[in-house]
Image: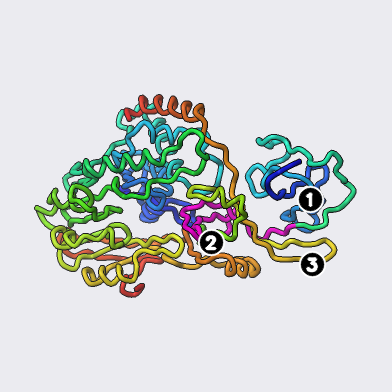
Amino acid sequence: MIVDSCVDGHSGEPAAVEYLRNLGVDPAEAVVIVLATHWHDDHIRGLAEVVRTCAGSRFLCPSALRTSEFLALTQSSVLGSERTTSGVREFRDVLKTLRARKAAGNPNAGPGFVIENTIIYRSAHCEVTGLSPSSAALERAMAAIAGVLPQPLRPHLRVRSPSSNEASIALWIRGTAGVALLGADVERQATDDRGWGAILALQPAAEGRSKLVKVPHHGSESGHDERIWEELLEGEPTALLTPWSRGARRLPTRTDRARILSLAPDSVIVGQGAAKPEGYDRAVERTLKEVAESRCIAKGRMGHARARCSRSDSREWQVELVRNAQRLSAAA
Amino acid sequence: MATSRAPIPFVPSQTEFPLSRRSTRWRPLRDTQLFVDQESPEAKLAPHQYTLPRLIPATNSVDTSERPQEILIALQSWEGVVLGVDDTSFVARLIDVAGEHDDEEVKLSRDELSDFDLELLEPGAILYWTIGYRQQLRGSRERVSRIRLRRVPAWTERQLGEAQERATDLARDLDW
């Protein structure tokens, strides 16, 4: 199962596909589900290539995208020729692949849509449940998506995804070899009918808490809900997180790092963070210093953290760090 | 021809300065006319491939015997998209046109844009940024940074209607 996608800046390959191939695993045979947690560029770059490569997989995405308007957006013939990536283009290409599969006689090629408390995969060894979005969150997410769709006489700009994370899909993975919570970009909301409040009401940890968590929303304060750590996770779990930046804004912040480390001292962060781009002509570098208020690499060499636990000791996760993955305590 | 903005230099094909002996990246600059952004995808096409309306000379007579007085040596070019805007600055994601450097995100002051481009500044806008030298053929050179926003047409009812029709077909095919 592949959840979300990012592209390695050097190979140009989706990182998950590259990882599996390096393990000697054929993604076309092995991957049964490709899931996009939500429509934000930092979660779906290379998604179309992942779906294309994983020929035997089912594609799942948030129910909030199940509108005729969003589908029409993906079918616009004037999306532009710019080099910049676009989430809309990724979805358009995903749908093109699914349509071809359907035309080739695969009756299950259509996309699946995830809402709260949906079992999206079950086998003898593992069960994966979608914990969100709740119906209240879904309603807001659909309204937010409607708000960014193109209108007649408005400039034909690159369409942005809504900034809210209401549609984001958190996952609860229960296997014979451990339990994991993948928090996606789910945030704490003002009311408990949405976000983490709604997820907690589902009591996903009734049969046992998780010792592994992908920290929600890049470790931000808005993604933090104390109850996650008290009710869903065991004490001092293995926590994995990915950074985010836009201009001078960075996640996790120094405060976020301190908070996460106090809850999970062995936390791991994966990603290039605020690394500065290098290798330009000296005159270019001088100009960049004069003109740009801040800069950081947006798509560089990808690293990864691999968390594994054995069936004999499902409470302990072993984490391996590759390339730019590191202990959060060292990065802070 | 009357225009509300400063002209961007363009040299019609019959007057292109033979620059390939020194560098294919040299582009002639002249005070003639232009309605195509030099960094736009259209500008990289051969003249017969232009999808925009053909360029119309600002004057009826173009002196082809005179060499351009200055050229732009482009050292680095990016294409980008504006991700966010505030009162004083904006953030953009940049892709190296030559594909030799990692994508990056930069925060730039609004002051880097002309008044005309400021009107186009909003999230989702496409920008072109070139850093290079403006070289006088018989004189000085200066380092220049030129950021321009792509001019875009408006969505039309027809475009959106056609997209909706295709979406209806797709929805049927995929059980959307």
Could you tell me which chain the residue with mark 3 belongs to? B
Q: Residue furthest right?
A: B65
Q: Residues within 10 Å of mark 2 (few under 14, many from 20)?
A: many
Determine whether A154 is above or below A190 in the image.
above
| Residue A12: image location, x then y, percent | 48, 52
Q: Provide the residue designation for mark 1.
A: B31
Of A45 and A11, the residue lying toward us: A45
For the N terminus of chain B, the image quarter is top right
Chain holding disc 2: B
Q: Nearer the viewer, mark 3 or mark 1?
A: 1
Asked if badges 2 and 1 are on one and the same chain, I answer yes
- Which class describes the residues within 10 Å of circle 1: few (<14), some (14-19), or many (20+)? some
Q: How far separated are the C-alphas under marks 2 and 3?
A: 28 Å
Q: Which class describes the residues within 10 Å of circle 3: few (<14), some (14-19), or many (20+)?
A: few
Please report the residue visible at 48 percent of the width from the left and 26 percent of the height from the top: B162
- Asked if residue A128 shows in the view, the reply is no
Pick the front one: B125 or A27: B125
Q: CA distance from mark 2 to mark 1?
A: 29 Å
Range shown magenta: B72-101
The amino acid type of the residue labelled 3 equals Ser
Residue B140: assigned label: 3
> Which residue carries the number 2 mark?
B108
Residue type indicated by callout 2: Leu
Left or right, A202 with respect to B48, comes to left
| Type of the residue with mark 1 | Asp
A29 drawn magenta: no
* B99 in the magenta segment: yes
Query: Seen from this angle, which residue lies furthest left?
Result: A206
Q: Position of residue B28 (x, y in %)?
A: 77, 52
